[in-house]
Amino acid sequence: MGNKMKNLLAGLLGALMFAYASVKAVPAATLPVHKISDHFYVIEAREDDGSNVGVLVSGTGVLLIDTMLPDAKDMLLATLATITDKPVTHVISTHGDGDHTGANTHFQNLGAEIILQANVAYSNVLYTRTYEDTLTLTFGGQTVMLYGFKSHSFEDTLIHLPQDNVIFTGDAYNEGWHPSFYSGGYEGQSAVYDKTEALADPKTLIVPGHGKLSRIEDVIHQRTLLDDWINHIKALKDAGQSYEAMAEDPQTIAFWNDFTRSADNPRGREMFVRRTLATELMDMVSLSHDQLSALEGRYLYTDGVRVEIALEDGKLFARNKGDFFSELQPLSPSIFHLRGWVGGQRFIFDTGKDGKTMGLTFVGTSNNYKARRLKNDSPH
């Protein structure tokens, strides 16, 4: 190799190493921080960063509420460094979505406790501690109260810090967006609204999962809009309109613009119509407790995957540890819709001549999957 080529390669390598070192030297950007008190802060995320974050600082450590997207971890760490040099010892996730749990693994690897509502066991999300209905923690002399719900997800947590008069809603309430109540339906969403209104006063700071910091009047406004929205979509459905026509109805557009207060989004609006129908306005039949309980049990697919069918509070659920959780809505005694799903997916239960349930078929968007019922097996 000639000296000119060697010198050229050496120069290129030096330039690349300098560029790499220069990039490495640039500090991570930081996000806006709202100081609520001497010990509590809110990090306000941008649209592409994931969730808003709560930061409760004690004399020995930090409790975080949500941890944004994985790609925002460095920005979260850089922002935390402007608040405190204490280690993160506890993380409470308002639910298991990745835009709220992105840095959980990082903090767990450093020894932090990761707390979620118990239904997180039916997902693939990391946790070290769970609770069922309520949990009260004391951290640095401050009370942190957790309330479990099924609304946006099956593991929603509403968090109340009474001394600082702050409520974190997770995605059960997002500012500047419509309610995504597809797991718990209107009943679950209403329960979140009820608890929020019971805990709040006019000065309470409401921290949404996403969007700007809010007050209770903002939550009440969204609740009123949701009531009107569902009634409106039901009226259009009863009139025989297609969901495409519903999405283009002038009043539908007006509701959408009030929910989102952003540029019109026809695809997003149509999907909200479809998911509202799939969550709250299916043509269901009424089945007795005995009819539903007869379907309970564990079922085994040919690929080895198991699904548990369980009856809780008069509702039937399909679930599998570490995998999924869905409410089943009866369209007939044997055909069930997955609440909130818009692809036409169904569970169809197979009954033998003796009237006993022998198995089920999951009807997917492109394939069907059969499972046999395991004998002498019950979810209880």
Image (cartoon, rainbow, N blue to C red):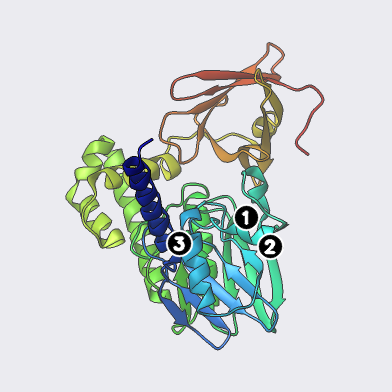
Measured as percent of width and height from the top left, residue 199 is found at 55, 76
Residue 64 picture location, percent across and down: 59, 69
- Residue hosting label 2: 110
Taking 11 as reference, is 367 above or below it?
Answer: above
Question: CB of mark 1 within 8 Å of CB of mark 2?
Answer: no
Q: Which percent across, then down, holds residue 86?
A: 64, 77
Which three-letter amino acid code belongs to the residue tagged 1?
A: Thr
- Compared to residue 353, the image places residue 49 above or below, namely below
**Identity of the residue furthest to the bottom in this view:** 38
Q: Nearer the viewer, residue 196 or 23?
A: 23
* Residue 78 vertical placement versus 163 (above, below): above
Residue sitting nearer the eye, 282 or 135: 135
Under circle 3, the secondary element is helix
Of tags 1 and 3, the one toward the viewer is 3
How far apart are the alpha carbons under marks 1 and 3? 23 Å
Q: Residues within 10 Å of mark 1 (few under 14, many from 20)?
A: some
Asked whether the residues under the numbered discs 1 and 3 touch, taking CB atoms below 8 Å apart as contact, a structural biologist would say: no
Q: Amino acid at mark 2?
A: Leu
Give the SS element for disc 1: helix
Label placed on residue 105: 1
Q: Which of 59/120 is in front? A: 59
List the single residue furthest toward the right.
Answer: 376
Name which quarter of the figure residue 106 lies in: bottom right
Viewer-side residue, 274 vs 124: 124
Q: Earlier in the sequence, mark 1 or mark 3?
A: 3
Q: How far is disc 1 from disc 2 in space, using C-alphas?
A: 9 Å
Q: Residue 24 got which mark? A: 3
The label number, if any, that marks residue 122 in the structure image: none
Q: Secondary structure at mark 2?
A: loop
Marks 1 and 2, the one that precedes in the sequence:
1
